[in-house]
Image (cartoon, grey):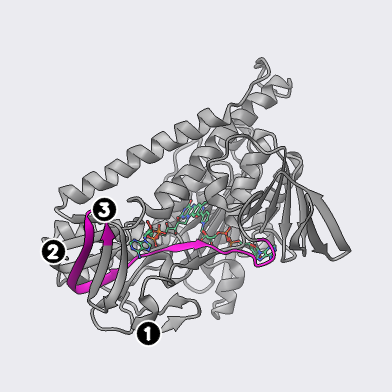
Amino acid sequence: MKEIVCKLLVIGAGPGGYICAIRAGQLGVDTVIVEAVKAGGTCLNIGCIPSKALIHAAEEFERVSHMAAAKSPLGISVETPKLDLTKTVAWKDGIVGRLNSGVLGLLRKAKVKIVHGRATFRDGKTVEVETETGTQVIRAETVVIATGSEPVELPSLPFGGPVISSTEALSLKAVPQKLVVVGGGYIGLELGIAFAKMGSAVTVVEATPQLLPQYDAELVKPVVKRLGELGVRVVTGAKARGLSGETLLIETTEGEERLAADKILVTVGRKPRTEGWGLDELDLDRAGKFLRIDERCRTSMRGVHAIGDITGEPMLAHRAMAQGEMVAEIVAGKKRTWDKRCIPAVCFTDPEIVTAGFSPDEARAQGFEIRVGQFPFNANGRAMTTLSEDGFVRVVARADTNLVLGIQAVGAGVSELSSTFALAIEMGARLEDVAATIHAHPTRSEGFQEAALKALGHALHI
Ligand code: FAD
Ligand code: NAD
């Protein structure tokens, strides 16, 4: 049995783990990373990147289809387009492959040792990995658990046959004629909208009374409108009960209903990957199903850190990366602690939704007296010239000091405003700072400046 002794062992090479290992390597820490499947983890291989590739392809197809149906006011006409999903998926796989080799290259450049195989804990400082060349034992002074998350399976609707998770949805051979999406959250709506644009008849079944229940109703409204335009049927307050022959049985507020479907995409959340690899025996403290961590990502066992999805919400790649970078610096002896003011979130629906910091309700619940400024995109020149006037930017600030507490937006392309929003909050901007910053014209970002001006009581364009 081969044995490696190192200073830092990172388990899992998703965005949390690979960033942690690269940064540790850059700082001269003797680092080993173990990955069971493919470097890049969920995000790069079966999550963020492939889903955004498919969403983009679907957008392009829908745009051309719209023109072909002579609905374009721009005076452009085209022949009826066709979509070959196998080619789309091959293009997507090419992007994933490029990024995958890129991550491996970056790890090597940082002098990180990469071990391929599934790690199993022997004790808090030792793992065993079954590799192609035999069992490898790795002992480390510090261990970082970054094993991520996996889709939640509904007991009444186990994965298999027509019932698929996001992983299979990203590699289908043909566009399903009838697609039922169970769970109208992030993944269900991002992919449900993409398949509707590619030609599927989509029904979304959501348990709560509102789609995307994590956002306030006002932010979700433009997405609901667009779903209607795309012909997506939405059934809220409804739960899937299981397959009944060729159909899906759902229970709605009005009774039972059967839905015909070629594919049933179940997207009812993700759970931490904690089982089946000896983690249970370490008996680390939990926060619900997730590992409990402190402000330095330390678990309840000395020398064992945890980062990313395994540590709970928000399960976002950029949070995992920021935690990974921080932990690497702590291991290298730097004084670091989690002091972020916000973690921006983007939902890549049509239109997109961005949030950073507190919503008006969250700010009030924190005890703040607030002022709110909102600016609609239908008063923004750039939005008019790109045929995408739905949505708005909203700024939430303390009423006494005008300190910006939160910024939300819904609209075409607003994902690219997420970093501006996060920067404003991280830098402690006040409404006056945003209002006094010259925003280039004509851009959608002017909506941010106008929302701040509105909160100050003197918007210029509404
Ligand atoms: P993961 O990326 O899950 O990586 C964990 C790695 O650990 C995996 O590679 C796994 O193989 C490995 N592993 C597990 N157990 C072991 C073991 N015992 N031994 C060795 N290796 C092991 N987030 C965003 O911020 N933006 C998005 O647009 C976005 N889109 C998404 C779309 C979809 C369809 C999905 C499913 C997720 C999306 N996410 C998005 C969420 C994002 O993918 C996760 O938040 C992110 O991947 C978490 O990173 P992580 O490092 O914690 O874990
Ligand atoms: P989610 O939590 O976003 O949505 C799950 C939805 O399913 C909720 O609306 C919930 O009410 C509903 N639901 C739960 N049980 C149900 C049932 N039995 N029947 C019908 N509906 C039910 O989860 P997700 O969409 O699976 O995504 C998982 C995580 O992945 C997200 O929390 C997010 O952190 C991450 N993600 C992020 C992005 C992004 O950043 N753009 C994209 C995709 C995924």
Residue beneath the point at 53% across and 68% down: 358
Pointer 3: what residue? Answer: 132
User: Which quadrant of the structure image shows residue 15?
Assistant: bottom left
Question: Percent x, y for residue 384?
Answer: 62, 34
Amino acid marked by disc 3: Glu
Regarding residue 462, the answer to whether it shows in the image is no
Q: Which residues are magenta?
A: 130-157
Question: Percent x, y for residue 328?
Answer: 22, 66
Pointer 1: what residue? Answer: 283
**In this view, 283 is above or below 251:** below
State the CA–CA distance, disc 3 to disc 1: 30 Å
Front-lying residue, 207 or 323: 207
Q: Quadrant of the N terminus?
A: bottom left
First in sequence: mark 3 or mark 1? 3
Residue beneath the point at 69% across and 26% down: 66
Question: Percent x, y for residue 310?
Answer: 42, 69
Amino acid marked by disc 2: Val
State the CA–CA distance, disc 1 to disc 2: 27 Å
Secondary structure of the residue carrying tag 1 is: loop
**In this view, 230 is above or below 35:** above
Q: Is residue 425 magenta?
A: no
Front-lying residue, 68 or 71: 68
Disc 1 or disc 2, which is closer to the eye? 1
Q: Is residue 335 left or right of residue 404?
A: left
Question: Percent x, y for residue 134?
Answer: 23, 59
Pointer 2: what residue? Answer: 29
* Mark 2 residue crowding within 10 angstroms, few (<14) / some (14–19) / many (20+): many
Q: Is residue 430 left or right of residue 118?
A: right
